[in-house]
Image: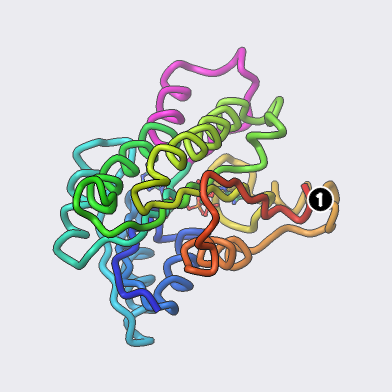
Amino acid sequence: MDDRVAIITGGSRGIGRATAIAAANRGFRICVGYASNQAAAKSVVSDIEAKNGKAIAVKCDVGNEGDIVALFRAADEFGKLGALINNAGIVGPTSRVDEMSAERIQRMMAVNVTGSILCAREAVKRMSTRHGGSGGVIINLSSVAAKLGSPNTYVDYAASKGAIDSFTIGLGYEVAGEGIRVAAIRPGLIDTEIHASGGEPDRAQRLSQMVPMKRVGTADEIANAIVWLMSEQASYVTSAILDVSGGR
Ligand code: NAP
């Protein structure tokens, strides 16, 4: 059991929610970041507290540096940081690149890439032995889109996740001697509301037959991999990217 704080950006719904509950079950004090859905964030906190876990919810748009700094300050008040799950992420509506606005692409990169890097910056400042910390774990949410490129759907999203893969490898090497492990998960088609937010609620089910295992995955199946990476069971894993995708 680890009773340090785990910050989970976008911890209010989907994969983030499942991870918050799974990590709380392993003893972590959970700091649930959310963008706007306060009710969903509060319900995660209530579910954790109902099982005698500890959790707080903090509003944080990871596209905003000020929000990120405030999130980490709130977490400092809550306990000693031991893990960051860079989970918050967005997709855009299905579109070709020659139809995309600059605003869409900039927002995609601000949330999915810059937000993750800035959160990692704050986590390294607290967890690195170079800064007097006692180590920790950073898990980034990539996507199999980084390998597939997502043509005619959202190449900008795929590119943002490709950046997360490179970031995971580089940051992992950078802090490997400072007590911090860094890894990424590349989920495949997972049954969450992200598909509806891109305008296609049945996307995961529609594409499920293209998955070698012939089904979509669940948020819990991703959370199980994340909490393993967070644990001492994964003590020799860093700069690693794990596909959790039913073979996709
Ligand atoms: P989801 O169901 O859409 O949930 C998104 C979560 O992120 C919510 O908690 C949301 O908060 C939060 N969020 C959205 N924009 C944010 C922002 N700007 N700042 C902070 N938080 C923000 O998403 P999901 O499917 O669980 O996806 C989680 C991660 O897995 C993402 O990085 C995604 O790219 C990746 N992924 C998902 C799939 C999949 O098939 N589902 C596949 C591959 C990778 P609110 O509740 O406040 O809106």
Q: Residue at x 37, y 36 (%)?
A: 117
* Residue 21 horizontal/vertical position (percent): 44, 73
Whether 80 is drawn above or below 63: the answer is below
Decide if residue 242 is on the left or right side of residue 101. Answer: right
Q: Amino acid at mark 1?
A: Val
Colour mapping = rainbow
Q: Nearer the viewer, residue 201 or 2?
A: 2
Q: Residue at x 48, y 17 (%)?
A: 101
Q: Is residue 92 magenta?
A: yes
Hey, which quadrant is residue 158 in on the image?
Answer: top right
* Residue 23 horizontal/vertical position (percent): 43, 71
Q: Is residue 73 magenta?
A: no
Whether 52 is drawn above or below 167: the answer is below
* Residue 44 horizontal/vertical position (percent): 38, 70
Q: Nearer the viewer, residue 79 or 150?
A: 79
Whether 10 is drawn above or below 29: the answer is above
Q: Nearer the viewer, residue 29 or 138?
A: 138
Dot 1 crowding, Cα within 10 Å, few <14, some 14–19, many 20+ = some
Q: Residue furthest top?
A: 98
- Residue range in magenta is 90-111
Query: Which residue carries the number 1 mark?
Result: 211
Q: Residue at x 33, y 58 (%)?
A: 7
Where, quadrant-wise, is the N terminus in this rendering? bottom left
Q: In the image, is the residue at mark 1 within 8 Å of ligand 1 by its beta carbon?
A: no
